Image (cartoon, grey):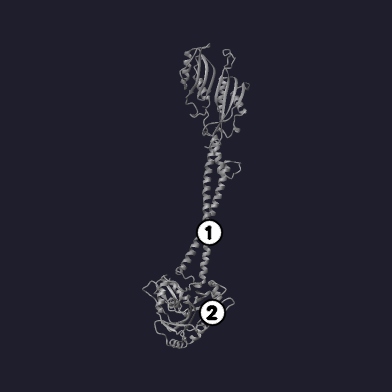
Amino acid sequence: MELLRVINSDTTSQIHHEKDGSSLPAITLMRESKFQHAIVVPEIFDETFAVDHIEAGTPIVIALPSQVCFAIEYHNAAKKRLPKHDALSYELEPDLPCDAEDLAIGAIAYHDGWLLVAVEATRIDAFIQVLRRQSIIPVCITPQLLLAWPDIKSTLSHEEQIVIVEVDGEIDLFRTKQGMPVQWMWLGEQIDCLDERLELLSGSNLPVTAIVSEHDPSAKLCHWLEQRKATDIQFPPQVLQVELTEQIRKRSLRIAAGKEVPLVDLRVGPLAGLTRQTPISKMLVLSLWSFLFLVAALASGCFLRAAQYRAATASLAEDQRAVFRRTFAGERVPVGITRRMLSERRQLAGTRGDAAPSVLSVNAILRAMLIGIPQDIRFEIDKLELLPQQIAYLDGVVRSIDDAERFVSSLRSQGFDVRPLSSSKTSRGMSLKLENVTFNSTATKNDESVNQ
Amino acid sequence: MNRSQLSHEHLALVSFVLLVPLGLLGWLSLQSARAGYLDMIGQLNECQLLANEITSLRQERSVASRSTLESPLTNDVLLTILTQAEIDQTKLAQIERLPPSPIPNTEYVRDDAIVRLTNATLEEVVKMIVAADRSDQGISATSLNLAWPRGSASSSSDAEVWNVDVVLTHLVYDATSQSR
C-alpha cells in the first residue's frame, strides 16, 4: 500500500494508488440471462475468462473492481478546462506505475476540480480480446462502485463528508462534496489503517456515513464505528444498509440498454475503440482494404485502358492524316481535317455533277425551229428572239395567209405551242408575228430551267 | 483495440482519402480517352467517305465555277468559241458583260456575257451555239437575238446575214449566298 503525493509547478494533484500485490479474488460473474443485457464483473482479466454463455452482440457493461482502478484528485488553477486525454496521460505518467499510452482516464467534475479515475488498459486487454473474439460489445467500462453512486448519493446528508462503503468485507473510502466524490481510496480488508487514511483525506473531522451491502458491518468496522461514535460527539457516524450489488446490477442493465449514462466511462484513450463496431472492426478494416485494393486496381485499369485508348486514337489520327494526304496530294495537313474535307466536298458538289441547276441552251429550240420551218414557202424574218423554251418574239412576212398558217402548223408539229395567228397585209405580203410561243420538247436537257 | 490496429485503420483511412480521388481521376481519364477514341473513329470513317466522294466528284464534269474570278467566260475562251464556229473576228462587234445575278433559292450566281456579232450567217450562229455548248467549261447559250441588218437590201443579198446577240451563261457556285 502506498501513497503518492505530487505537487507540480502549475498543477496540484493528489494521486492515491493502492496496490497490495496480492492475488486478485476469484471470478465473480453476475449475469441476468433472462434479460437482453448482461453485466460482467471480471476480476481475473485474462483469456481464461469464459464468455461462451453470453450471446454474441450482447451489449455488456464491464464493472471494474476497485482494486484495479486509480483515483486521482486533480486541481489545476491555471487551467479551467481539463487537458485532453493524451496530455493528461503524459502529465500523470511520472507518478503512476504504468505507461501513459496504457492509461484510460475518465473524469468526474465537481465545483473546483476533477476526480480522475483511471485503469491500466493492458490489465484488461486480454479480457477485452476475449470479448471481441466472441463479438461481445462493452458499452461501458466503469468502476462498479461508481455504478451505484446515485444510490450512495441519495444517502448523503452533509455538504462534505466521508463515506465508507463495505462490500463483501472490503472497504472503499470516499470524501464527498455536494454529493460528488472528490477523493477515493480502496482499503480492501485493511481496516486497521482507516484512521491513517482519513487523515490523508483530511477527513478526520468530517461526518462519516458507513454503507454496508446486504449484511451487517464486519466486526472490525463495527469496532471502528463504536470508537468513532465515542470520539465524534457532534457528528456520530451513521450506518446504512444498501443493496449495492443489486443496485449495481440494475444500473448496469439500464446503462447497457442506453437508458442511463454512467458517472464515468473509461472507454477512452487506449480503450476508445470499443464501440458497437469493435467486434467487426477487423472485418471492416479488411473490407476497407479490399475496397481500397479494388479502387487501386480499378484506377490502374482505368489509367492503363485510357493509355491504350490514347495510343489507338493517335494511330487513327495518323490514318486520318494519310487519308487527307491521299486526297489532297501536296497540301499541308490542316488542323481540322474533317472540316476541310467537308468544305471541299461541298465545293465540288456545287461545281460538278448534277447538283447545279440546269442551264438550258437555245440550241434545242433553234434546231426545232429550223426543222419546223417549211421549206416550200417563202418568208422573211426581220427579227427573232429565242430563249431556251420559248420564242420570245418573231417578226416577219409571208406571201399569204395560207403560207402563214402552214408556217405555224409546222412549228406546232415540232412542239411549239402557237396560238391562233393574227395577220395583216403589208407591202411585202402578210405579216407574221409570234410572241411568247412556248416550246415543249423531250429534247430539252432538263425540266428545270433557270432561264425564265 | 491496440495501437497497431489503430494505425492500421488510420493507414486505411489515409489510403482511402488518397485512392478514391485517384480512382475517380482514373475513371474520368478513361471516359475522356474513350470519348476521344470514339470521336476519332467517327472522324476517320467520315473522312474516308468524304475522300471517296471527293475523288468521285472530281471525275464529274464541271458545271460551275467556285468564284466569279474563276469564270471561264474570258475573252480568250470566247474567241476560241468563235474560232471553233469559223467566225471571222471582224464580225465580233462587242462583248458585253452583265453583272452577276443570283439565282433565287439556290447557291448559284449567273455570270452572263453578251457576244454581239454583225453580218453573221445563220450557219455561223448555229456553229457558235454548238461550240459553246460543247465546251467542257459549263458554258451555255441561253439567249439568241437575230435581227435583219437595217438598211440592207434583203433581196439583193445572196447570203442571209444577221446582227446577232448571243448570251453566253456560266454558273458560279457561291456557297455563302445561302446555306444548303
Relative to A34, is A390 on the left or the right? right
Q: Nearer the viewer, residue A71 or A431?
A: A71
* Quadrant housing residue A384: top right
Q: Secondary structure at mark 1?
A: helix
Q: Name the residue carrying label 1.
A: B21
Q: Is residue B163 above or below residue A311?
A: above
List x then y, in percent, for residue B162.
Answer: 58, 18
Disc 2: which residue: A14
As rendered, which of A257 and A224 lies closer to the eye? Answer: A224
Q: Tell me the distance, in whole angstroms, between the alpha carbons under discs 2 and 1.
A: 51 Å
Looking at the picture, which amino acid does disc 2 mark? Gln
Tell which subunit mark 2 falls on: A
The image shows residue A76 at horizontal and vertical percentages of 55, 75
Residue drawn 53% across the image and 45% down it: B43
Identify which amino acid the numbered label 1 is placed on.
Pro
| Above-or-below relation of A185 to B150 | below
Q: Residue furthest top?
A: A427
Q: What chain does badge 1 belong to? A: B
- Residue A47 can be seen, yes or no: no
Q: Are marks 2 and 1 in contact (CB under 8 Å)?
A: no
